[in-house]
Image: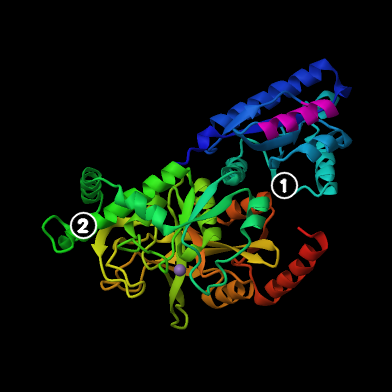
């Protein structure tokens, strides 16, 4: 469902006519080689497309306007091989609606100490040419990422890939549609918000659909389709005995499969990229969708429970950013704590809806009662998650702006097996530790729902927040509460002053 190779970033090199044709030819050759090398790099998820060197205000405006109009172009990589007087960039950058990254590199990695002459100096001017370009970006208040280093440095490629993934997720949000089955969980605050403001600022739309419309799709599913899906379950998961043909719950599993097929049909027909459900509005559905939601998430759909559309959109964006990377991405909730001094940790889970893309080892398909919702027992995938680095993120609405929180975590092994826990689960220690991490999260108003990923890191989310114009608060190893509280206060002032 997510293919990053459909996306291009345009490699735009700035110069001017001052240097003469021979130098400009060399500039173009060098830029073409860099773009081709980046594009061919296995470390970069998107294609890099060389664009002719821009030397005049007209050429700069033209490339920016063309980028706006090309749906495959997710942004620009800008680089000033030579000096490119930056007043030439004002009109173009004013018109540019795609994100850009400033690659502060140089064609030659090393200074040729023995041979360097003024020809070399005239050709390789990014050390000062890029500063002139940087000035105008800052003067115009343009948010962008600046990457410094030689273009063959794997660290530079990795930073560029991180940015490109964020830019792809941003492009994916533009015009994206999210379906909200039912409304909000009644009386819950953080999952509410201004969907009009979200569409204006973030480009995606959220619309509600009566559960009856979904029920109609579920009712139209054929027995043959259910047979095929139940067989697929059997091939992919460790299906518990009571769910197998002849088992006491086999008919109920077929109902779960029916719900999955109905949901999938509804979402496919409507061209949706994500959805929400709420257990308080399931009228006409026999079960709360469990395995259905889990498998749809695994296919790339964003999801938020209890009507949480902001988290559904965030999970979708994190799915796009993580495409092709090792590790998965899921909807998540801080569920319960282990508060042993010195070993404090969080058990993350949800009633059902955790994505099997984060699973470690065998995934069980089981059916158990749900203590809330008053519906029949739902089928769900049950699994553990590998140890490693992860990240939790949340988007909430504070006054009239959207705030992203980002908190890297260490995913750890549970202290003991959890034989009676009938849901997928993740155990983690937030950075810098649970006491400071949770206090900072709560002070910042972070939601109980998150997007959780072991495929991407904080830098992806920070780049994404920059592109999206979101306030971004990082809670990491360097966080201390006194500074963090001040950051919250200063941000209040900043966002009021700038009205962003
Ligand atoms: Mn929840």
Q: In which quarter of the image is the N terminus?
A: top left
| Most frequent secondary structure within the magenta stretch | helix
Q: Residue sitting at 68 percent across and 36 percent down?
A: 76
SS state under label 2: strand
- Left or right, 371 with reference to 389: left
Tell me if mark 2 has few (under 14), some (14-19) or many (20+) residues whose alpha carbon lies within 10 angstroms of its own: some
Whether residue 127 is situated above or below residue 399 in the rendered picture: above
Q: Residue sitting at 74 percent across and 29 percent down?
A: 63
Residue 353, percent across and down?
A: 39, 61
- Left or right, 261 with reference to 168: left
Which label sits in the foreground, 2 or 1?
2
Start-end of magenta stretch: 54-69
Residue 397 seen: yes
Q: Quadrant of residue 395?
A: bottom right
- Left or right, 86 with reference to 171: right
* Residues at circles 2 and 1 in contact by the CB criterion of under 8 Å: no
Tell me if mark 1 has few (under 14), some (14-19) or many (20+) residues whose alpha carbon lies within 10 angstroms of its own: some
Q: Which of 303 and 183 is in front in this view?
A: 183
- Residue pointed to by mark 2: 239
Q: Which color scheme is applied?
A: rainbow
Residue 63 colored magenta? yes
Residue 179, percent across and down?
A: 49, 53
Q: Residue sitting at 76 percent across and 18 percent down?
A: 25
């Amino acid at each position: 469902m997510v293919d990053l190779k459909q996306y291009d970033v345009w490699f735009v090199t700035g110069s001017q006519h001052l240097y003469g044709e021979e130098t400009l030819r060399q500039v173009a050759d060098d830029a073409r080689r860099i773009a081709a090398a980046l594009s061919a790099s296995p470390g970069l998820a998107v294609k890099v497309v060389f664009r002719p060197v821009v030397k005049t205000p007209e050429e700069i405006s033209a490339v920016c306007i063309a980028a706006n109009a090309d749906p495959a172009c997710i942004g620009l990589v800008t680089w000033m091989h030579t000096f490119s007087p930056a007043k030439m960039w004002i009109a173009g950058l004013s018109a540019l609606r795609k994100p850009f990254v400033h690659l502060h590199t140089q064609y030659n990695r090393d200074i040729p100490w023995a041979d360097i002459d003024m020809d070399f100096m005239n050709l390789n001017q990014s050390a000062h040419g890029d500063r002139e370009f940087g000035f105008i970006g800052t003067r115009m208040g343009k948010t962008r990422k600046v990457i410094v280093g030689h273009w063959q440095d794997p660290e530079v490629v990795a930073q560029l890939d991180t940015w490109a993934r964020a830019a792809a997720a941003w492009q994916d949000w533009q015009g994206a549609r999210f379906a909200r089955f039912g409304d909000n969980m009644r009386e819950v605050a953080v999952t509410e918000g201004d969907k009009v403001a979200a569409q204006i600022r973030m480009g995606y739309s959220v619309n509600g659909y009566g559960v009856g419309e979904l029920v109609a799709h579920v009712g139209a599913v054929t027995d043959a389709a259910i047979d095929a899906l139940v067989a697929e379950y059997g091939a992919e998961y460790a299906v518990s005995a009571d769910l197998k043909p002849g088992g006491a719950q086999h008919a109920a599993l077929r109902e779960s499969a029916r719900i999955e097929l109905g949901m999938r049909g509804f979402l496919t027909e409507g061209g949706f990229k994500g959805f929400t459900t709420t257990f308080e509005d399931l009228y006409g559905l026999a079960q709360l969708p469990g395995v259905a939601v889990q498998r749809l998430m695994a296919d790339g759909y964003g999801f938020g429970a209890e009507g949480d559309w902001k988290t559904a959109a965030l999970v979708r964006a994190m799915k796009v950013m993580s495409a092709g990377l090792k590790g998965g991405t899921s909807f998540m909730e801080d569920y319960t704590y282990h508060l042993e001094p010195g070993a404090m940790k969080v058990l993350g889970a949800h009633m059902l809806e955790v994505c099997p893309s984060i699973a470690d080892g065998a995934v069980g398909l089981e059916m158990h009662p749900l203590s809330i919702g008053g519906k029949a027992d739902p089928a769900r995938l049950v699994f553990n998650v590998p140890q490693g680095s992860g990240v939790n993120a949340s988007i909430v609405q504070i006054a009239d702006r959207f705030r992203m929180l980002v908190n890297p975590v260490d995913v750890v092994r549970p202290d003991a097996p959890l034989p009676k826990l009938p849901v997928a689960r993740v155990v983690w220690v937030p950075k810098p530790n649970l006491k400071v991490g949770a206090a900072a999260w709560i002070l910042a108003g972070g939601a109980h729902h998150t997007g959780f990923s072991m495929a991407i890191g904080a830098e992806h989310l920070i780049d994404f927040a920059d592109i999206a114009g979101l306030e971004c608060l990082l809670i990491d190893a360097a966080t201390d509460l006194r500074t963090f509280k001040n950051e919250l206060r200063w941000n209040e002032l900043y966002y009021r002053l700038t009205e962003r």
